[in-house]
């Protein structure tokens, strides 16, 4: 969104672009790029001391490259301009600074700083003792799903980035935000935009940072550029009937570097008649950057054998855009940008009916060794082939899925494929211990185990679709443990609920450990393949709980657990938490300043003094 901030003494407002207008109530200062016209204008209207400090800072900032300025680990520097802006949501006066971590060509050259929820802003605020206001409770559930706190999860992340130095990122529920309180991020963005548009102080907006793209490469292997250079210097497109331009044979060609593109040496190929008058002309000797091809290959997949068109428009309307894009940071910067550019060109040409090629983006993290990126020549490099030989492909896949959120880096020293292999063996033994027939009626089985199985069935799809693979694997492990307990000290392997649970485990494991899952499926008496079994529906009658455990935290530490009704209100839950003897002891003589009750599962109590 574009948000207008009134500037005291300027006689007009300035516009700030933000992707998170929902955090507007958390803005505590504004930062402008030192090399922007706006910074110069603001400094010019300030005191001589500020003008001198600004000039010196600008000279220093101009010595750094754009890449250096954007380095998240770089120490933050800045200069106060002794000017003030007015937050359009709160009416609060906020100071304006200039800092080189803001670029003049991003948005309008100014950013609203929300230090509680942006790491760069937080680093800056902590250095210069600027206020940090939390407006997003990242411990709160977002989708309405009930959070489950397990034994051993003694602490939730504290909501105090000013103390921890770690910005609160991700989703949650709005707090300290007036009319936005209690809303999720998506709903809060919609509401604040409506509020800004109603007041005439903002509006929904998009911004793009597109620059010229040099696509030519001085290489032999690549897509030829379909341009002919006339003797008079004119550029002539290759006629339609002569397309596509095909690379010449390499036989007999000397492709050694000679200060020109290798194709220039293919004289029979490069020398062609001018399509206009037949006079001598030359093909373009360069080839295209490979990104030109990969920027639209997902559309070619729809019509790989069509020799007349790049892709079938009807197929593109049916299947595109792509649902999920997965790529590293390098891809997000280059390939993703180019693919979006090409797609917008195709849209303008009327060849596709969408402007964005990918619906969702995931930048996966890297596997590090001792905190460093591995390479083939690295002494700490881990051989994937050797690990597969030791533990099997299933164990390795499971290890990587369970290591943490896929967007985060992981250290190889912190994971254990051996432990994953042991878990898969434990899961496999469940299939060996099932003694009931495939046609048994599950509803006759143990109710407690069936409740766990169907809770897993209810939670699993969302975890998979939101790419929370590590959480899904953890829940598979929980169900495996519960099923093993039912076999060893419960109803036994002949119980219908045990078969049902093991079948569900097998289907879920097929997402991560297909070889193990296929063996289990066969042992359970079914024909291949488990991949075609499909995810089973949860029985809603088995999802109803008579009571739930509410976790009570005081200053981020678990102090009590209360058995409560799943229908308990937030007010009732808060009263029970305040009356808890354990909570009273933990609070002592300190003052309770905030109580956040997320019925029926969590109560967070913050104190001071």
Image (spheres, rainbow, N blue to C red):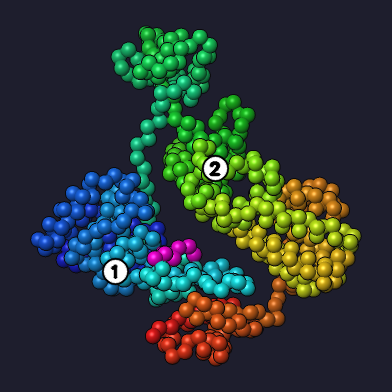
**In terms of secondary structure, where does tag 1 sit?**
loop
Image location of residue 216, percent across then percent down? 40, 27
- Who's the residue at 45% across and 81% down the image? 606
Residue at the image point whose x is 55% and y is 78% from the top: 558
Q: What element carries label 2?
A: loop
> Which residue of the protein is positioned furthest toward the left in this rendering?
48
Q: Can residue 220 be seen in this view?
A: yes
Q: Is residue 347 visible?
A: no
**In this view, which residue lies farthest toward the front?**
379
146 displayed left or right of 156: right
The label number, if any, that marks residue 130 in the structure image: 1
Question: Magenta span covers which residues?
Answer: 165-171
Is 157 in front, or is 495? 157
Percent x, y of residue 376: 53, 37
Quarter of the view holding residue 561: bottom right
Magenta stretch contains residue 170: yes
In the drawing, does residue 163 fall left or right of residue 146?
left
> Mark 2 against mark 1, which lies toward the viewer?
2
Q: Which of 110 and 371 is in front in this view?
A: 371
Instruction: Locate residue 203: give its quadrant.
Output: bottom left
In the foreground, 230 or 254: 254
In the figure, 335 relative to 263: above or below? below
Crowding at mark 2 (Cα within 10 Å: few <14, some 14-19, many 20+)? some
The quarter holding residue 484 reads bottom right
Taken as a whole, is the magenta stretch helix, strand or loop? loop
Q: Mark 2 points at which residue?
A: 381
Of callouts 2 and 1, the N-terminal one: 1
**Residue 340 drawn at (x, y percent):** 45, 43
Report the residue at 51% width, 21% height from top: 244
């Amino acid at each position: 969104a574009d948000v207008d901030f009134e500037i005291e003494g300027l006689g007009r407002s300035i516009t700030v672009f933000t992707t998170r207008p929902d955090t507007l109530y958390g803005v505590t200062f504004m930062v402008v790029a030192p090399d922007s016209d706006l910074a110069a204008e603001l400094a010019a209207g300030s005191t001589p001391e500020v003008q001198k400090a600004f000039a010196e800072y600008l000279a220093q900032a101009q010595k750094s490259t754009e890449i250096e300025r954007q380095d998240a680990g770089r120490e933050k520097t800045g200069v106060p301009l002794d000017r003030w802006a007015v937050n359009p949501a709160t009416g609060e006066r906020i100071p304006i600074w200039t800092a080189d971590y803001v670029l003049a060509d991003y948005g309008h050259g100014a950013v609203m700083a929300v230090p509680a929820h942006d790491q760069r802003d937080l680093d800056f605020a902590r250095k210069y003792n600027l206020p940090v206001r939390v407006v997003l409770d990242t411990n709160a559930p977002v989708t309405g799903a009930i959070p489950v706190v397990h034994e051993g999860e003694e602490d939730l992340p504290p909501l105090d980035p000013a103390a921890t130095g770690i910005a609160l990122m991700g989703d949650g529920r709005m707090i300290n935000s007036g009319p936005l309180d209690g809303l999720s991020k998506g709903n809060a963005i919609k509401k604040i935009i409506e509020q800004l548009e109603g007041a005439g102080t903002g509006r929904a907006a998009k911004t793009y940072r597109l620059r010229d793209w040099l696509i030519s490469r001085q290489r032999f292997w690549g897509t030829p550029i379909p341009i002919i250079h006339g003797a008079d210097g004119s550029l002539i497109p290759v006629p339609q009937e002569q397309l596509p331009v095909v690379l010449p044979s390499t036989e007999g060609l000397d492709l050694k570097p000679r200060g020109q593109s290798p194709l220039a040496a293919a004289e029979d190929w490069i020398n062609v008649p001018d399509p206009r008058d037949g006079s001598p002309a030359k093909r373009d000797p360069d080839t295209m950057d490979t990104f030109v091809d990969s920027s639209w290959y997902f559309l070619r997949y729809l019509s790989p054998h069509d020799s007349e068109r790049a892709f079938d428009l009807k197929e593109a309307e049916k299947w595109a855009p792509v649902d999920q894009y997965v790529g590293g940071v390098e891809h997000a910067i280059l390939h993703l940008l180019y693919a979006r550019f090409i797609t917008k060109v195709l849209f303008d040409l009327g060849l596709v009916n969408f402007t964005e090629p990918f619906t969702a983006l995931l930048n996966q993290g890297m596997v590090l060794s001792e905190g460093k990126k591995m390479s083939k020549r690295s002494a700490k490099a881990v051989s994937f082939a050797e690990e597969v030989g030791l533990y099997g492909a299933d164990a390795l896949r499971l290890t990587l899925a369970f290591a943490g959120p896929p967007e985060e880096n992981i250290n190889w020293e912190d994971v254990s494929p051996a432990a994953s292999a042991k878990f898969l063996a434990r899961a496999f033994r469940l299939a060996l211990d099932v003694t009931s027939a495939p046609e048994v009626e599950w509803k006759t089985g143990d109710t407690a185990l069936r409740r766990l199985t169907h809770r897993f069935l209810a939670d699993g799809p969302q975890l998979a679709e939101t790419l929370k693979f590590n959480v899904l694997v953890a829940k598979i492990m929980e169900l495996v443990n519960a099923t093993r307990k039912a076999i060893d000290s419960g109803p036994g392997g002949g119980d219908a609920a045990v078969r049902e649970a093991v079948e569900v485990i097998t289907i879920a494991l097929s997402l991560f450990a297909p070889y193990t899952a296929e063996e289990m499926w066969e042992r359970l008496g079914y024909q291949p393949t488990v991949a075609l079994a499909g995810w089973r529906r949860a029985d809603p009658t088995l999802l109803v709980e008579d009571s739930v455990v509410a976790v009570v935290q005081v200053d981020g530490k678990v102090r009590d657990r209360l058995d409560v009704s799943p229908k308990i209100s937030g007010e009732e839950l808060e009263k029970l938490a305040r009356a808890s003897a354990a909570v009273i002891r933990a609070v002592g003589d300190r003052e309770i300043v905030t109580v956040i009750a997320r019925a029926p599962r969590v109560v967070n109590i913050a104190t001071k003094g």
